[in-house]
Every structure is written in C-alpha cells, then in structure tokens.
Amino acid sequence: MTLMTQEINGINPIDRPILQEGATGEAVKKLQQLLNSYGTYSGDIDGVFGFETTGGVILFQYRFFLQETGIVNSKTWQVLYKCCPVDMPILNRGSQGKLVVALQQRLRIAGKYTDVFDGNFGPVTEAAVKSFQHQYNLPADGIVRDRTWFALSNLNEFSC
C-alpha cells in the first residue's frame, strides 16, 4: 500500500476535497485548524476559504516544498496530516533546478548558505548541506534525502 492510500491519523488524505478560495464548509474548517496548528494561519476558524486562508496555504506550501498555488490538493492534504515533505527527490552535487533554489533559500534561512540562488548544486551548496546536516545530527554526506528535507521544513517556529 502506498502512502497516498494509507490512512493518516484515521483520515485518508486522498478522500479530502480539493479546496481553493471561495470554498466553504467543514473541510475548510479542518484545513484552517491544521494551518493554525502549523502557525501559517491566524484567522477565524469559520469554514470560509478567503484571502487569509489562501495566504496560509501558500505559506504552508512554501515551508514544505510544495508548489505554491494556494489550492489544497491531495498532496497538500497528505503533507498537512503527515507533517513532513512527501515524494521529495534526492538532491546532491550536480542537481539543478527550482528545487535546488528552494534548498539554497532554506539553507540561507538556516545561516548555512551565503552564495547566490542559482539552482546549481555545486560545492558551495554541498558544503552548506553538510554543515546543516551536522548541526541537526544527520549523516553529513551532503546528500539531501528525506531526513534532511524534514529538518529543512521545520526551520520555522512551528513544530510537528
């Protein structure tokens, strides 16, 4: 059974509705409660998916390396219930792209990266990853796998 079909805390995230601005109801209330527990939403728990809820979703998606759409799809639900990034690729020296930029940005927040956000996982990024991993008692091999993604997603003041 894959994670997408497993129940998480008694809820199957794939069974949750896709939500976006304009939605209303109990599913929106649950979303607002979850976002509030992550510290990404401080508005009313009123079941109305408005501007503030959209902002909370986007901030949550940013923190967990999801596409920042403001739309809550099954993957966003899955991360909301699991409290960690899901389906993340392994990144190491030679990797390139938007996810490397996101990695570099998060490493800067951690105080480990001072170079430009160029999307190239070179020796400077690798050294920053190793330093970050060492600080968080992870194997300091410079390769970004699940445990490193998890630690990077928890740099902010919320906890799981």
Image (tube, rainbow, N blue to C red):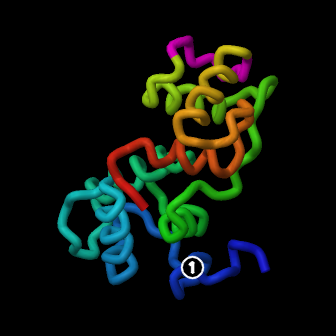
Q: Residue at x 74, y 33 (%)?
A: 141
In the figure, 150 relative to 29: above or below? Answer: above
Residue toward you, 104 or 49 = 104
Mark 1 Cα shell of 10 Å, populated few (<14), some (14-19), many (≥20): some
Residue 62 locus on image (x, y percent): 47, 44
- 100 to the left or right of 104: right
Magenta segment range?
114-122
**Can I make out residue 33 in this image?**
yes
Q: Main secondary structure of the magenta part?
A: loop
Residue 140 locus on image (x, y percent): 68, 34
Q: Residue at x 51, y 23 (%)?
A: 112
In the figure, 49 relative to 62: above or below? Answer: below
Q: Secondary structure at mark 1?
A: loop
Q: Residue furthest left?
A: 44
Residue that mark 1 sits on: 8
Q: Identify the amino acid type marked 1.
A: Ile
Q: How many marks?
A: 1
In the figure, 66 relative to 19: above or below? Answer: above
**Could you tell me which quadrant the N terminus lies in?**
bottom right
Q: Residue furthest bottom?
A: 10
Q: Residue at x 45, y 68 (%)?
A: 19
Residue toward you, 5 or 91 = 91
Residue 115 locus on image (x, y percent): 55, 12
Residue 114 locus on image (x, y percent): 50, 14
